[in-house]
């Protein structure tokens, strides 16, 4: 489930667009969201992560938090803490008191840095404006993203944009295996002071931790 979460966080933040094959109204809305988010020097967000599989009658809801500064981030969700300092990534499993250290591949969709939200802005999806609706007392734009690459494991992503705040409120990813992954944003705090140690795993705070270094 963890690999789906990272791709979900990535798509939640990035709004990848291929201009020539997309709806101008949808692009205009997402451009405003992008411009607004670029004003943030740092960002802290709380969210709900929901996994659904209607075929197997499964619904799993979890809550998480993410801290971002530049190309660095920390994620705390589902008993796992993930730290990235711009070079190395630490994935700490609380239950087993184990941390895996890796060097993420920037070209891997499933492990891409969710903090790099503007570097790949214009590739990957056809974008369509669907409707405007009210949900949870918010006025929302509904926009669908379709992957250009048909070999991707998902067929569609639905974004819900807060019309008044120019922020992403929720998105839902429809996987071809029948799993649906949704992130709903409960709170976004921009420009929150963050020290560099936020993005480093501190083994001194985890006595007895097993360290597995998978870096080349």
Image (cartoon, helix red, strand yellow):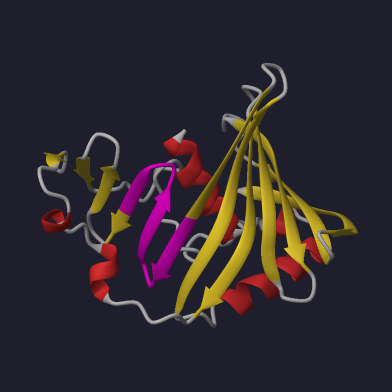
Residue 134 position in % (x across, y down): 88, 60
Of residue 175 and residue 28, the one placed in the foreground of this image is 175
Residue 73 horizontal side relative to residue 20, left or right: left
Q: Is residue 201 visible?
A: yes
Residue 115 horizontal side relative to residue 148, left or right: left
Residue 115, compared with residue 195, is above or below; it is above
Kindly indicate the quadrant of the structure image that contains residue 204: bottom left
Residue 15 horizontal side relative to residue 202, left or right: right
Label count reads 0
Identity of the residue drawn at 44% across and 42% down? 78
Residue 56, compared with residue 22, is above or below; it is above
Judge whether residue 66 is colored magenta. Answer: yes
Kindly indicate the quadrant of the structure image that contains residue 160: bottom right
Q: Is residue 216 visible?
A: no
Identity of the residue drawn at 16% across and 51% down? 206
Q: What secondary structure prevails in the magenta region? A: strand
Residue 4, compared with residue 135, is above or below; it is above
Residue 95 position in % (x across, y down): 29, 36
Of residue 3 and residue 31, the one placed in the foreground of this image is 3
Kindly indicate the quadrant of the structure image that contains residue 115: bottom left
Residue 130 position in % (x across, y down): 86, 52
Residue 146 position in % (x across, y down): 70, 43
Q: Quadrant of the C terminus?
A: top left
Residue 16, compared with residue 56, is above or below; it is below
Identity of the residue drawn at 26% across and 52% down? 89
Identity of the residue drawn at 62% across and 40% down? 50
Look at the image and give the residue range highlighted in magenta: 65-82
């Amino acid at each position: 489930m963890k690999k789906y979460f990272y791709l979900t966080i990535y798509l939640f933040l990035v709004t990848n667009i291929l201009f020539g094959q997309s709806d101008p109204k949808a692009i205009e809305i997402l451009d405003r969201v992008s411009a607004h988010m670029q004003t943030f020097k740092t960002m802290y967000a709380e969210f709900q992560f929901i996994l659904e599989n209607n075929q197997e009658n499964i619904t799993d809801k979890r809550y998480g938090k993410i801290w971002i500064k530049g190309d660095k981030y920390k994620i705390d969700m589902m008993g796992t803490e993930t730290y990235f300092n711009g070079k190395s990534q630490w994935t700490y499993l609380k239950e087993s008191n184990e941390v895996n250290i890796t060097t993420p591949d920037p070209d891997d969709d499933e492990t891409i840095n969710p903090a790099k939200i503007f570097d790949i802005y214009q590739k990957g999806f056809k974008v369509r404006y669907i409707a405007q609706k009210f949900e949870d007392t918010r006025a929302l734009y509904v926009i669908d993203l379709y992957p250009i690459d048909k070999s991707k494991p998902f067929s569609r992503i639905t974004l819900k944009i807060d019309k008044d705040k120019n922020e992403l409120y929720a998105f839902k990813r429809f996987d071809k295996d029948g799993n649906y992954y949704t992130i709903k944003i409960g709170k976004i705090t921009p420009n929150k002071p963050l020290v560099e140690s936020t993005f480093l795993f501190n083994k001194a705070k985890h006595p007895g931790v097993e360290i597995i270094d998978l870096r080349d």
